[in-house]
Image (cartoon, rainbow, N blue to C red):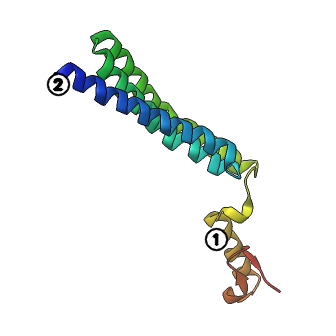
Amino acid sequence: MTLESVLDVVGAALILVGAFFTLTAAIGILRLPDVLNRMHAASKPQTLGFLLLCVGLSLVLRNGSATAMLAVAACLQLVTSPVATQMMAKAAHRSRQYRADLVVDDRERERIDDDGDRAGLDPDETDPDIGRASR
């Protein structure tokens, strides 16, 4: 078995694994219940799948200019994906486009705890699941 055939097999395997992760991300976007979960599915496995595809293609193609272009694409993906994910999360949080029963907002809980202390409520009377004073 020559080095070229080994590189072809490894490259093909990386392309298949990358395609699997990308498919998993697509299925996650369709199947998960709210924006924040879908955003997670869109960012994590999709980025890993794209990087594996780029590495696999560079191993199969073995061309300097193609490898350089794939490296630029991979770097751009690594730079833009976290930023886009963070912006989508902020927009979803600000517009309340998420299932509140799946999210724990520590800032909201701290604000309510501070209000409860000011109102003379016992901190034990605050329900941690809903973040409001239970009466």
Direction from residue 25 to residue 31 in the image, left or right: right
- Give the number of marks: 2
Q: Residue at x 72, y 74 (%)?
A: 131
| SS at circle 2 | loop
Which mark identifies residue 30? none
List the residue tagged with mark 1.
110
Q: Nearer the viewer, residue 134 or 56?
A: 56
The x and y percentages for residue 49 are: 46, 35
Figure check: 11 above or below 127: above
Hey, what amino acid is under mark 1?
Glu
List the residue tagged with mark 2.
1
Direction from residue 28 to residue 72 in the image, left or right: left
Q: Residue at x 71, y 82 (%)?
A: 126
The x and y percentages for residue 17 are: 42, 36
Q: Quadrant of the C terminus?
A: bottom right
The answer to whether residue 135 is visible is: yes
Q: Residue at x 68, y 42 (%)?
A: 30
The x and y percentages for residue 50 are: 45, 31
Q: Quadrant of the N terminus?
A: top left
Q: Nearer the viewer, residue 25 or 99?
A: 25
Disc 2 crowd rating (10 Å Cα; few below 14, some 14-19, many 20+) is: few
Hey, what amino acid is under mark 2?
Met
| SS at circle 1 | helix
The answer to whether residue 78 is visible is: no
Q: Nearer the viewer, residue 123 or 64?
A: 64
Q: Earlier in the sequence, mark 1 or mark 2?
A: 2
Figure check: 5 above or below 113: above
Q: Nearer the viewer, mark 1 or mark 2?
A: 2
Question: What is the quadrant of residue 66 in the picture?
Answer: top left
Direction from residue 120 to residue 41 in the image, left or right: left
Q: Quick one: which residue is furthest to the right in this view?
A: 135
